[in-house]
Image (tube, grey):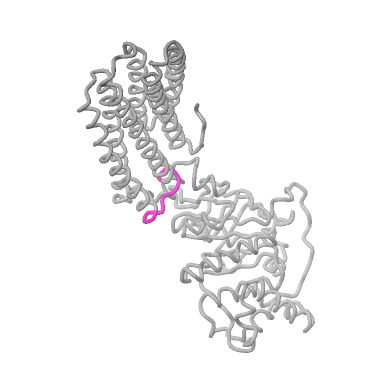
Amino acid sequence: MRVWVDMQTETSPAQIADVSPDIKLDARQINFFYSDFQALHDVSLAVQACKITALIGPSGCGKTTFLRIFNRMYDLVPTARVTGEVLLAGHNVLDPDTDVIQLRRQVGMLFQRANPFPKSIYDNVAYGPRMLGWSKLEVDRIVEESLKDTGLWDEVKDRLKRSALNLSGGQQQRLCLARALAVQPNVILMDEPASALDPIATLRIEELMQELKKRYTIVIVTHNMQQASRVSDFTAFMLMNQQRAGELIEFGPTDDIFNRPKDNRTEDYITGRFG
Amino acid sequence: MAAIRTQFDQELAELKSGVLRLGSMIEQAISDSMRALVERDNELAKRVIARDQEVNELHRQLRERAFMIMATQQPVARDLRLIVSFQHMVLELERMGDHAVGIARAALRLNDLPLLKPYVDLPRMAELTESQVHDILGAVIEADQDRARAIAERDDEVDILYHKLWDELLGYMIEDTANVHRAAILLFLAKDLERIADRVTNIAEDVVFLHTGRIVELS
C-alpha cells in the first residue's frame, strides 16, 4: 500500500478536449512490456462513468496488468514500459509529469486479498485523510461515512479502536474498500475482490458495488463469469495472441456479451469451451 | 482450442434428441388422429388418446432435464438459448399433442354419425399442417433460421383453408339445423389443426431466437 504513503500534493492535471463526458477512463492503443516481453498489445477501452466494467479472460491474458495501468501501479515494476494513452478527466495519466499520488487518490484500488494495515479499524480508514491533512472533525466524519458506505458501520462502530486484523475476511475486504473511499476517489479498480471470500461475503461485496456505482466508476477483474454477468454493465473479454500478448477481443454491454457475443472466441470462453 | 465440457455437451445432445423424439410422437399423433377420422377408425382414435400419456410423460421429463441442466451447468449465450428454446418447444409440442387428442375425440363423436360432407378440405389442411410440423423439426435439427422463417410463412395457407371451412360449415348449419351438431364438431376439429399450425410458427420463432438471440414475431 505504498499508494497512500506519500499523499501530499493535489495538482490539477492539464485538460485534453476530445473525451466524452460519459467516459471516465479512456485507454487508447495500450502496449505494455515487461522488459522485452509484450504483455498487452494495442488494447483500447473506454470505461463509462458510474458504471461497472468487468474485465474477463483466461489466466495470463493481461487483465490485471491492464487494470493496473489505470492508476500506474506498474510504476512499482522497474522493467515495466507502456505506450499509448489513458485519459482521465482529459489528462493522459501515462504522461511522465502526472502526479501519481494524486492519480492514485482519484483511482483507488481493491486487491484480491484484503490487506488492512496492522492498525485499528479507525486508523485504517483515517490513514488517507490524515495524510491529506484533513482536520480531526473531517477525518471522523469521513471515517463514519466510508464505513457506512461499505455497510460496516453498524458492525464495527463499538470497536473502532480494535485491530482491523480481527475482522472476518469479508469485513476486512469491506474495510479496505472503506479505506479507498475515504480519500474520495472517482474510480475504484477491483482485482478479483471476492475471490478469497465465501459466497455470502461475495454477495455483500457485489451488492455494495451496485450501491457504489451510483457515485463511482468501477472496473473489476474477475475470473468468475457469473459474477461478471451479475454485477457489471459492460464486459471486456481479453485473450492472449500468438505472441502471448493480451488483446481485447470484444467489449460491449454485459447483456450482449453474455447473450449474443459477436466473436466466436468470446462465445467459446463464456460457455466454458475454451481450453 | 481444446473441446471441453464434454458432459455438458452430452446432456445438451440428449435434450435435443428428446425434443426430436417428442416431435416425432406428435407427428404420428396428428397423422393417426386424422386417419381415425377419415377412415372412421375408432380404435385408432382411442390409441391416439391413450398415447397422449406418453407424450405428457416425455414432456415432463424433458422439462425436468432442461431445468436440471440450467441449475447445475449455469449455461450462457448459445447454450442458454438452446435450453430455453427447447423448453418452449416441448411445451408447444405437448400442446400439439393435446390438439391431436382433440381431433381423435372429434373423430370418435363423428365416426358413428352419417357424413355431413365428404372430407376434402380437412385432409388437405391436415396434410399442410403435418408437413409444417415435419419441416419445422428438420429446421430444429439444422438450427436453420431461414428455413424456419419460410415454414412460418406457410401458416397463411392453413389459415385460408380454415376460413374457407368455417364459411362452408356455417353454411351447412344455416341450411339445416340438423347439421349443427356435426358441423360444430368439425369446426372444433378444424380449429385444432389451425392451432397446430400456429404452434409451428411459435417453434419457428424459437429457432430464430436460438440462432440470433432475438425474440421475433413471425406470425
Q: Outermost residue, left direction?
A: B43
- Tell me: A105 left or right of A252: right
- Tell me: B13 left or right of A127: left
Q: Position of residue B121 (x, y in %)?
A: 36, 13
Which residues fall within the magenta stretch?
Answer: B71-79
Q: Residue at x 72, y 69 (%)?
A: A184
Depth check, front residue: B213 or A197: B213
Q: Position of residue A150 (x, y in %)?
A: 63, 72
Quadrant, the N terminus of chain A? bottom right
B143 part of magenta stretch: no
Depth check, front residue: A136 or A241: A136
Q: Residue at x 78, y 79 (%)?
A: A138
Q: Position of residue A33 (x, y in %)?
A: 54, 57
Q: Residue at x 42, y 12 (%)?
A: B176
Q: Residue at x 31, y 11 (%)?
A: B118
The answer to whether residue B49 is above or below residue B84 is above
Image-quadrant location for residue A133: bottom right
Image-quadrant location for residue B140: top left
- Tell me: B2 left or right of A74: left
The majority secondary structure of the magenta stretch comes to helix
Depth check, front residue: A154 or B176: B176
Depth check, front residue: B66 or B185: B185
